[in-house]
Image (spheres, rainbow, N blue to C red):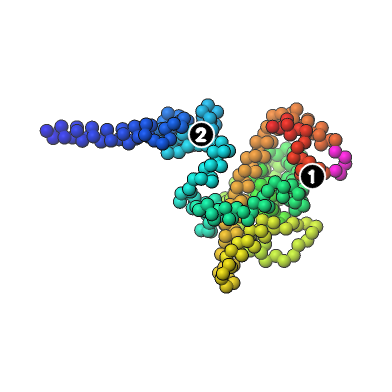
Amino acid sequence: MQLWLVVTGLAALLAAAIHRYLIQPLLRSPLKTIPLAHPLCGVTHLYFQYLAKQGRELNALHAAHKRYGPIVGTAPNEVSVISLEGLRQIYTSCTKTDFYHVFANFNTPNMVSMLDHKSHSAQKKILSGIYSKSYLQHSEDVARISKIVICARLLPLLEHLVGQGRSANVYRLMQFVGIDFQTAFQFGVERSTRLVEYHGHEGVHYSTKDVSVPYDTNDPRDHDLLPEDEILEMCKATLSSQHKDESNTTDPIVFEKLYSSLKDQDSLGKDSSNDHDENTILRTASELRDHIIAAQETTAITLTYTLYHLSQRPDLQSALRHELSTLAPGVHPSPPDLDSPPPSSTLS
């Protein structure tokens, strides 16, 4: 009798487990019509966790999207979406969870960590103008930043490395390019980082490095994301700066726009106080740090893939060199002109 009760209890537990972890995810889930990246994804999230540990997650996900389309299931309650329209629907219609609080800096919300759509839209509206394509293409400051970061920092470094036969971690270098450009755009060239020239936070100029040392860094400091204290100091230094030398610096475009708008919000209906100023600085720093984090990832990935594919296409390199050779000496095409050059169809 006792054995029968034990067997019955175990059978009931097994049936409940089968219903909970097999039948419900596979047959009753609202996601059941979405194709699975792998059969195991319908019942467990461990499959892609395992692939991630093996460094094979992105390849498997890419293969699944090529096979099944822009939306695939990756776990019982998770999907991967690569459709532009799908992403637009997600970011405009779906409610964020508390998970997004992890993206706040200084325990202060930014656009990524804001949960309510109204606050997110208000902050996005502040910055949308200066991040628009038309603004970037016609901004003299952006043109000057590009010239400084590319021509005065990156190209001399590459020439130096080639001359010495030294290798370079291209992805790391492109991260430095992204951060240097973004901080110059945010705070002005005078207060921007100079990671391209100084190996991240090592503080050693590339020209002083030993020939046998590759252009890379194992600096223990978190230069990838830039520590919060550094971003805060850059904000405070920008706020206190009253002078501009037209010959070697640019306006703190993003900082000025964001800080002034947030300051108006914080002082609305309130008496001016140091507490309000500190809150405005923290809100500004939180947002700008997030932009830097995004820039060092997106810029690095985009430029690294571009350089890689160019390295595999000598014909493309020849076409670009030919196009550049048609320019008169000293002539620099404007960004709008570069937006649709003849080789662009080849690049795509």
What kind of residue is marked 1? Ser
Neighbour class for label 2 at 10 Å: few (<14), some, many (≥20)? some
Q: Which of 39 and 300 is in front in this view?
A: 39
Q: How far apart are marks 2 and 1 (CA)?
A: 39 Å
Q: Percent from the top left, x then y, of residue 169?
A: 65, 40
Q: Which mark is residue 82?
A: none
Q: Is mark 2 on a helix, strand or loop?
A: strand
Neighbour class for label 1 at 10 Å: few (<14), some, many (≥20)? few
- The overriding secondary structure of the stretch rendered in magenta is loop
**What range is drawn magenta here?**
327-331
Residue position for label 1: 334
Q: Is residue 96 left or right of residue 193?
A: left
Residue position for label 2: 71
Q: Which residue lies furthest to the right in this view?
A: 329
What kind of residue is marked 2? Ile
Q: Is residue 291 visible?
A: yes
In the figure, residue 324 lies in which quadrant?
Answer: top right
In the figure, residue 17 lies in which quadrant?
Answer: top left
